[in-house]
Amino acid sequence: MAYVITSRCAGFKDGACREVCPCDCIYDAGEQFVINPDDCIDCGACVTACPVEAIFADIDLPAEHSAALHFNRAFFES
Ligand code: SF4
Ligand code: SF4
């Protein structure tokens, strides 16, 4: 399991999630921030820090944000 940042982050990008992440696995991907799924330890700290509710556990990802799963992982495979 890992946490995923959705497109709700785009246009906001205040970096609050990165401030609280204990393992520095949140990166600026341009239009939005993304989480490295291999380094995320599933602590959930970023979820409560996000003012626009852009972050979800992958197993709770709403269907309309399903593309975010690939988008987050793909950033770290390029
Ligand atoms: S769940 Fe925890 S480890 Fe994973 S990205 Fe969020 S703050 Fe970082
Ligand atoms: S806290 Fe939310 S809006 Fe801010 S950078 Fe992180 S995901 Fe984007």
Image (cartoon, grey):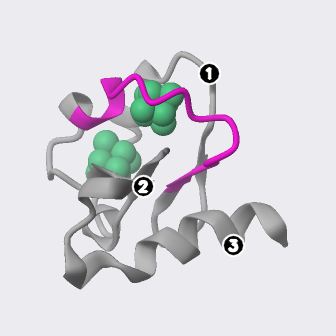
Whether tag 2 and tag 3 are in contact, CB under 8 A, the answer is no
Image quadrant of residue 13? bottom left
Q: Is residue 64 visible?
A: yes
Q: Magenta stretch containing residue 46, yes or no?
A: yes
Tag 2 secondary structure: strand
- Give the residue at x 15% y 52%: 52
Which residue is tagged 3?
74
- Magenta residues (range): 34-47
Q: Is residue 73 above or below residue 3?
A: below
* Kind of residue indicated by mark 1: Cys
Residue at the image point whose x is 43% and y is 73% from the top? 68
The answer to whether 74 is drawn above or below residue 18 in the figure is below
Residue closest to the eye, 8 or 55: 55
| Mark pair 3, 1: CA separation | 19 Å
The extreme top residue here reads: 22
Q: Earlier in the sequence, mark 2 or mark 1?
A: 2
Which of marks 1 and 3 precedes in the sequence?
A: 1
Picture coordinates of residue 49, whole percent (x, y): 24, 30
Amino acid marked by disc 2: Val
Where does label 1 land, which residue?
Answer: 23
Give yes or no for residue 78 being in the magenta stretch. no
- Give the percent coordinates (x, y) of residue 20: 41, 20
Ligand 1: does it lie within 8 Å of the C-beta at label 3? no
Please tell me which residue is depicted at 44% across the width and 30% down the height of the picture.
42
**Distance from Cα at disc 2 to Cα at disc 1:** 15 Å
Can I make out residue 18 in this image?
Answer: no
Binning the other alpha carbons within 10 Å of mark 1 as few (below 14), some (14 to 19) or many (20 upward) gives few
- Return the mark for residue 4: 2
Residue 70 image position (x, y, % from top left): 56, 76
Give the structural element (helix, strand or loop) at label 1.
loop
Q: Residues within 10 Å of mark 2 (few under 14, many from 20)?
A: many
Is residue 6 left or right of 53 when viewed as pictured?
right
